[in-house]
Image (cartoon, rainbow, N blue to C red):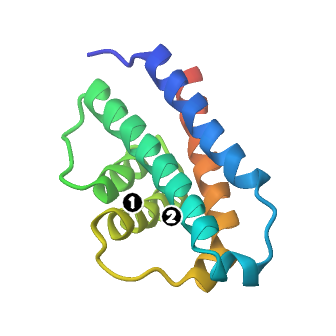
Protein backbone atom coordinates (compact mmCIF):
# COMPACT_ATOMS: atom_id res chain seq x y z
CA UNK A 1 0.00 0.00 0.00
CA UNK A 2 1.48 3.37 -0.93
CA UNK A 3 1.75 6.24 1.52
CA UNK A 4 -1.38 8.37 1.35
CA UNK A 5 0.42 11.71 1.24
CA UNK A 6 -2.82 13.70 1.40
CA UNK A 7 -3.87 11.84 4.54
CA UNK A 8 -0.50 12.41 6.20
CA UNK A 9 -0.58 16.10 5.29
CA UNK A 10 -4.08 16.42 6.78
CA UNK A 11 -2.84 14.72 9.96
CA UNK A 12 0.15 17.07 10.06
CA UNK A 13 -2.24 20.05 9.78
CA UNK A 14 -4.27 18.65 12.69
CA UNK A 15 -1.05 18.22 14.68
CA UNK A 16 -0.10 21.82 13.95
CA UNK A 17 -3.50 23.07 15.17
CA UNK A 18 -3.17 21.20 18.47
CA UNK A 19 0.37 22.43 19.03
CA UNK A 20 -0.43 26.01 18.07
CA UNK A 21 -3.33 26.01 20.54
CA UNK A 22 -0.97 24.86 23.31
CA UNK A 23 1.68 27.40 22.36
CA UNK A 24 -0.86 30.25 22.53
CA UNK A 25 -1.57 29.50 26.17
CA UNK A 26 0.27 31.97 28.38
CA UNK A 27 0.10 30.85 31.99
CA UNK A 28 2.34 30.96 35.04
CA UNK A 29 3.35 27.75 36.81
CA UNK A 30 1.27 28.40 39.94
CA UNK A 31 -1.87 29.03 37.93
CA UNK A 32 -1.19 26.04 35.71
CA UNK A 33 -0.77 23.68 38.68
CA UNK A 34 -3.70 25.06 40.67
CA UNK A 35 -6.24 25.37 37.86
CA UNK A 36 -7.60 21.98 36.87
CA UNK A 37 -9.26 23.42 33.76
CA UNK A 38 -5.96 24.77 32.44
CA UNK A 39 -3.86 21.68 33.07
CA UNK A 40 -6.64 19.42 31.83
CA UNK A 41 -6.79 21.45 28.62
CA UNK A 42 -3.02 21.20 28.09
CA UNK A 43 -3.07 17.46 28.86
CA UNK A 44 -5.98 16.92 26.48
CA UNK A 45 -4.32 18.87 23.68
CA UNK A 46 -1.03 17.03 24.21
CA UNK A 47 -2.89 13.74 24.19
CA UNK A 48 -4.62 14.65 20.93
CA UNK A 49 -1.31 15.73 19.38
CA UNK A 50 0.39 12.48 20.40
CA UNK A 51 -2.59 10.48 19.07
CA UNK A 52 -2.19 12.25 15.75
CA UNK A 53 1.52 11.35 15.66
CA UNK A 54 0.64 7.74 16.46
CA UNK A 55 -1.83 7.73 13.55
CA UNK A 56 0.87 9.04 11.23
CA UNK A 57 3.44 6.55 12.48
CA UNK A 58 1.14 3.56 12.05
CA UNK A 59 0.16 4.72 8.55
CA UNK A 60 3.80 5.05 7.52
CA UNK A 61 4.64 1.62 8.91
CA UNK A 62 1.71 0.00 7.13
CA UNK A 63 2.42 1.81 3.86
CA UNK A 64 6.11 0.98 3.83
CA UNK A 65 5.36 -2.64 4.62
CA UNK A 66 7.63 -3.06 7.60
CA UNK A 67 6.37 -5.35 10.36
CA UNK A 68 3.84 -3.68 12.64
CA UNK A 69 4.68 -3.22 16.25
CA UNK A 70 2.38 -3.93 19.14
CA UNK A 71 2.70 -0.60 20.94
CA UNK A 72 2.83 3.02 19.86
CA UNK A 73 6.18 3.33 21.64
CA UNK A 74 7.54 0.50 19.54
CA UNK A 75 6.16 2.10 16.37
CA UNK A 76 8.16 5.27 17.02
CA UNK A 77 11.27 3.25 17.84
CA UNK A 78 10.82 1.33 14.59
CA UNK A 79 10.65 4.59 12.64
CA UNK A 80 13.97 5.50 14.23
CA UNK A 81 15.50 2.16 13.31
CA UNK A 82 14.30 2.59 9.74
CA UNK A 83 15.87 6.10 9.64
CA UNK A 84 12.50 7.72 9.02
CA UNK A 85 12.97 9.61 12.29
CA UNK A 86 16.25 10.58 13.91
CA UNK A 87 17.05 7.95 16.55
CA UNK A 88 16.99 10.40 19.49
CA UNK A 89 13.63 11.81 18.37
CA UNK A 90 12.19 8.30 18.09
CA UNK A 91 13.13 7.71 21.74
CA UNK A 92 11.48 10.95 22.84
CA UNK A 93 8.38 10.10 20.80
CA UNK A 94 8.30 6.72 22.55
CA UNK A 95 8.14 8.62 25.84
CA UNK A 96 5.34 10.74 24.41
CA UNK A 97 3.40 7.54 23.66
CA UNK A 98 3.99 6.44 27.26
CA UNK A 99 2.63 9.79 28.48
CA UNK A 100 -0.44 9.32 26.31
CA UNK A 101 -1.05 5.86 27.77
CA UNK A 102 -0.75 7.15 31.34
CA UNK A 103 -3.23 9.93 30.64
CA UNK A 104 -5.74 7.87 28.68
CA UNK A 105 -5.70 4.83 30.94
CA UNK A 106 -5.13 6.63 34.23
CA UNK A 107 -2.12 4.48 35.07
CA UNK A 108 -0.79 7.03 37.52
CA UNK A 109 -1.26 10.61 38.56
CA UNK A 110 0.27 13.38 36.50
CA UNK A 111 2.70 15.66 38.33
CA UNK A 112 1.48 19.00 37.02
CA UNK A 113 4.55 20.90 38.21
CA UNK A 114 6.73 18.56 36.19
CA UNK A 115 4.34 18.73 33.24
CA UNK A 116 4.49 22.54 33.32
CA UNK A 117 8.28 22.45 33.21
CA UNK A 118 8.34 19.91 30.36
CA UNK A 119 5.36 20.50 28.12
CA UNK A 120 7.02 23.17 25.96
CA UNK A 121 9.87 20.74 25.21
CA UNK A 122 7.26 18.09 24.46
CA UNK A 123 5.60 20.44 21.98
CA UNK A 124 9.01 20.91 20.37
CA UNK A 125 9.43 17.14 20.04
CA UNK A 126 6.01 16.83 18.43
CA UNK A 127 6.87 19.65 16.02
CA UNK A 128 10.16 17.88 15.22
CA UNK A 129 8.19 14.71 14.49
CA UNK A 130 6.04 16.67 12.04
CA UNK A 131 9.10 18.18 10.36
CA UNK A 132 10.85 14.79 10.11
CA UNK A 133 7.71 13.25 8.64
CA UNK A 134 7.45 16.02 6.09
CA UNK A 135 11.13 15.61 5.18
CA UNK A 136 10.58 11.87 4.72
CA UNK A 137 7.57 12.49 2.45
CA UNK A 138 9.58 14.90 0.32
CA UNK A 139 12.31 12.34 -0.36
Q: Residue visible at 45% across and 41% down?
A: 52
Mark 1 vs mark 2: give the one in front: 1
- How far across and down, in percent of the image, does residue 88 sit? 53, 62
Q: Residue visible at 40% across and 16% down?
A: 4
Which residue is denoted by mark 2 in the rendering?
A: 92
Residue 130 drawn above or below residue 136: below
Q: Can residue 139 be seen at all in this image of the molecule? A: no
- How far across and down, in percent of the image, does residue 38 sit? 64, 66
Which quadrant, please, contains the N terminus?
top left
Q: How far apart are the alpha carbons under marks 1 and 2?
A: 9 Å
Residue 62 drawn above or below residue 99: above
Which residue is denoted by mark 1 in the rendering?
A: 97
- How far across and down, in percent of the image, does residue 90 sit? 46, 56
Tag 2 secondary structure: helix
Report crowding for label 2: few under 14, some 14 to 19, many 20 or more residues within 10 A (C-alpha): some
Please give the label number shown on residue 39: none
Horizontal relation, residue 24 to residue 7: left or right: right
Tag 1 secondary structure: helix
- How far across and down, in percent of the image, does residue 26 sit? 81, 62
Q: Residue visible at 64% across and 56% down?
A: 123
Q: Which quadrant would residue 58 be assigned to in this image?
A: top left
Report crowding for label 1: few under 14, some 14 to 19, many 20 or more residues within 10 A (C-alpha): many
Front one among 38 and 14: 38
Front one among 96 and 100: 100
Amino acid sequence: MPIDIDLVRKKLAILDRHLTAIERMEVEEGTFVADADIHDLVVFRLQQAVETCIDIATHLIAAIGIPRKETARDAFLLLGQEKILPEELSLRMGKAADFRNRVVHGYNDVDFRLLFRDYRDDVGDLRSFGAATLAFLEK
